[in-house]
Image (tube, helix red, strand yellow):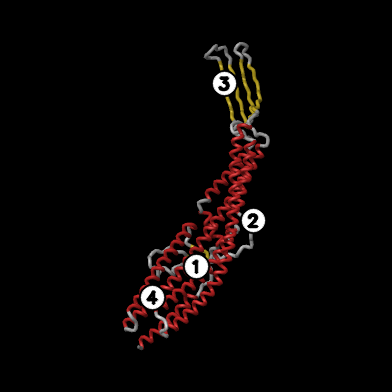
């Protein structure tokens, strides 16, 4: 009987000691630092470790720059910059195409052999049409702007992926931390019950119940470990790093609408500007021929008179009537222009939708956080009351385990909502195009 009394008093004491540990919360932004390192390496059920270390000297903006330098889409930006340079080199040239040199020599040795001969040389220069060079310079300039804006858009996309990866790790770490806490409590409870069963103070059914609870929590820890490792691998694959910033919380932007300087809109607008310049270029450019200026000299000897005749000539090739041939090329570029305009409309609608969802998510999370904090307080109070009832023999072990599970869930949800609020602030900044 004394042993049973010891159980009734000892079990509530155990829960009173461990429950506040569950309720203790690390500051948001520091919880990863507290949970991501070697803390789990000694307690892992499945021996698979993807180490992630905290680097206090690494900022979120630096992480973005490092990731962009290695991100595959950077190759597209580099190619666009090279294309812009090539277009600028073409438009800065003095001639519109390659220069040709022609040489010709003729004599009558294998025919009449009267001493007749003729030698000529000619230089042919491709010239710019009126307004063509200016149109080419406009294309080159806008292609350079488009390359820069495309790089900015890629950087914003990389930022989105990093924000998502970081906060996914944060949420996974919270899940693992809570699962390990629950496992620790259930293990201690199982040992206490096992000892009381050996003393004959409790029925064996209570031991089976406690063991079942322990094994169930062990399975939840295994699943939580897998989620942590998956999130870490996703982060490492994206950034090619095994380090994370010490703090990556963000301040909520005061931008309330999708503005014209949003990096995604600027990128598509730059493409539209380039296509419009390409239309003007196509209008002034013949797809087959260009105007040409030729300068030549000829030396000729008449076989009968034996006199040499020297002459110099200048020739010009002018084009006309090429509108019918240019029309298909102009129509092709115009189609690309209108496709870009249509993409811009779709993009703007999607950005507005993303902003609305980000605003709504913030509102919902703030409300859920307030409710979760109240539920957490109620759960902690209810847990203490239940412990007293259990010690007085008013409820059985099964009821205690049920209330304990609900309390742990309430505590976990309160912490989760805190993290979700910080994550949704980052997602709001992403929606309005703000870089960290």
Front position among marks 3 and 4:
4
**Quadrant (top left, top right, bottom left, bottom right) of the C terminus:** bottom right
In the image, taking residue 370 as reference, residue 233 lies left or right, namely left
- Residue, far front: 394
Residue on which the image places disc 2 = 259
Mark drawn on residue 187? 4
Secondary structure beneath disc 2? loop
Query: Is residue 413 placed above or below 101 in the rendered structure?
Result: below
- Residue, far bottom: 2
- Residue 44 is situated, as x and y percent measured from the top left of the image, at 40, 68
Asked whether the residues under the numbered discs 3 and 4 touch, taking CB atoms below 8 Å apart as contact, a structural biologist would say no
Q: What's the distance in space between the residues labelled 3 and 4, CA to CA?
A: 103 Å
Residue on which the image places disc 3 = 105
Asked whether the residues under the numbered discs 4 and 2 touch, taking CB atoms below 8 Å apart as contact, a structural biologist would say no
Q: What's the distance in space between the residues labelled 1 and 4, CA to CA?
A: 25 Å
Mark drawn on residue 32? 1
Query: Is residue 140 placed above or below 167 in the rendered structure?
Result: above
Asked whether the residues under the numbered discs 2 and 3 touch, taking CB atoms below 8 Å apart as contact, a structural biologist would say no
First of labels 3, 4 by sequence position? 3
Front position among marks 2 and 3:
2
Secondary structure beneath disc 3? strand
């Amino acid at each position: 009987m004394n042993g049973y009394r010891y159980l009734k008093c000892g079990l509530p004491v155990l829960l009173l000691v461990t429950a506040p540990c569950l309720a203790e919360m690390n500051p948001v932004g520091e919880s990863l630092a507290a949970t991501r390192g070697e803390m789990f390496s000694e307690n892992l059920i499945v021996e698979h470790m993807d180490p992630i270390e905290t680097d206090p000297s690494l900022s979120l903006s630096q992480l973005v720059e490092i990731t962009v330098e290695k991100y595959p889409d950077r190759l597209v930006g580099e190619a666009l910059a090279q294309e812009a340079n090539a277009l600028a080199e073409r438009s800065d040239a003095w001639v519109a195409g390659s220069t040709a040199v022609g040489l010709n020599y003729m004599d009558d040795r294998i025919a009449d052999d009267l001493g007749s001969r003729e030698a000529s040389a000619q230089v042919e220069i491709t010239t710019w049409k009126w307004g063509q060079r200016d149109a080419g310079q406009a294309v080159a300039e806008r292609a350079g702007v488009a390359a820069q804006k495309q790089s900015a858009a890629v950087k914003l996309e990389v930022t989105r992926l990093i924000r998502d990866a970081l906060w996914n790790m944060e949420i996974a770490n919270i899940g693992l931390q809570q699962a390990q806490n629950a496992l620790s409590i259930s293990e201690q409870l199982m040992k206490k019950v096992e000892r009381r069963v050996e003393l004959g103070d409790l029925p064996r059914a209570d031991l089976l119940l406690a063991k079942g609870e322990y094994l169930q929590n062990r399975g939840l820890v295994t699943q939580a470990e897998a989620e942590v490792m998956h999130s870490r691998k996703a982060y490492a694959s994206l950034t090619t790093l095994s380090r994370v910033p010490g703090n990556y919380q963000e301040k909520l932007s005061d931008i309330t609408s999708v503005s014209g300087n949003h990096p995604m809109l600027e990128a598509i607008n730059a493409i539209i500007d380039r296509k419009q310049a390409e239309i003007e270029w196509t209008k002034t450019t013949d797809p087959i021929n260009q105007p040409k200026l030729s300068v030549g000299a000829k030396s000729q000897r008449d076989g009968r008179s034996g006199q040499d005749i020297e002459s110099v000539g200048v020739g010009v090739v002018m084009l006309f009537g090429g509108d019918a041939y240019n029309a298909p090329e102009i129509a092709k570029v115009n189609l690309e222009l209108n496709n870009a305009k249509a993409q811009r409309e779709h993009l703007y609608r999607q950005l507005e939708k993303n902003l609305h969802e980000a605003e709504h998510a913030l509102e919902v999370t703030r409300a859920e956080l307030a409710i979760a904090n109240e539920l957490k307080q109620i759960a902690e109070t209810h847990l203490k009351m239940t412990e007293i009832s259990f010690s007085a023999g008013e409820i059985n072990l099964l009821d205690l385990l049920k209330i304990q599970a609900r309390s742990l869930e309430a505590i976990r949800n309160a912490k989760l909502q805190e993290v979700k609020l910080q994550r949704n602030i980052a997602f709001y900044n992403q929606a309005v195009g703000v870089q960290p």
